[in-house]
Image (cartoon, rainbow, N blue to C red):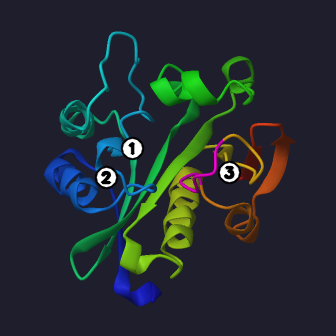
Amino acid sequence: MRMDIEIRKLSPDLAEKYVHFFDTTPHDDNIDEHKCYCVCWSNDDYEGKDFSTVEKRREYALQYVRGNNIEGYLAYKEDKIVGWCNANTKSDCLKCVSWRMFMNHVPIEELDSGLKVKSVFCFVIAPEMRRKGIATILLERVCEDAAKDGFDFVEAYPYKESSYRSTDFGGYYEMYKKCGFFVFLETEQGLVMRKKLR
């Protein structure tokens, strides 16, 4: 399987293909009006933005990819996008809408300590390609590049089954553990897991 999958870092020239992937891939609850285009996890300040409709989120997605506000990796199989992982510098994302709404349980000590943390926020895998290890391949690439780019940790936020969120877009504990992550913090809302890079 690994030989069939190519991982490409998201770049401005891939904006249209990125948006097309979200256009044609079901959201995790299969409700088209909920398609997020991953605009809620970005390095842009949410203040004053309107993400209330799928059309507005789609337009922001094009703008954000072209402006490097959404960062991450695309998985390709035979030149077709089959997976996405949103991975951005944690300290750059503290004003995005999803951070403000869902992440008050996550410490942000790197702002004072100088730690450089890469955050993995989200995975989207095409339905026909799920359970084939694509999220793991994406995560391994995130960690590899983060190490090369001088990050101290890669951090992830899988939810507990019993928490107020049942969606799996944040990835699973087992996948992170297999890739060398440890539980840094356990809260009612979910886990904070880290992989030490140096």
Q: Which mark is residue 10?
A: 2
Q: Which mark is residue 158?
A: 3
Say which element carries label 2.
loop
| Crowd tier of the residue under label 1, counting other residues whose Cα lies within 10 Å: few below 14, some 14–19, many 20 or above | many
Q: Please name the residue shown 39% across and 43% down the image.
A: 71
Q: Which mark is residue 71?
A: 1
**Where does the image place residue 4, in percent across and percent down from the top left?**
36, 87
Q: Please name the residue shown 51% across and 72% down the image.
A: 137
**Where does the image place residue 118, in percent across and percent down from the top left?**
58, 42
The tag earlier along the polypeptide, 3 or 1, is 1
Can residue 101 be seen here? yes
Left or right: 169, with 178 as reference point? left
Say which element carries label 3.
loop
Say which element carries label 1.
loop
Identity of the amino acid at label 1? Glu
| Crowd tier of the residue under label 2, counting other residues whose Cα lies within 10 Å: few below 14, some 14–19, many 20 or above | many
Left or right: 105, with 123 as reference point? right
Identity of the amino acid at label 3? Pro
Q: Which residues are magenta?
A: 165-170
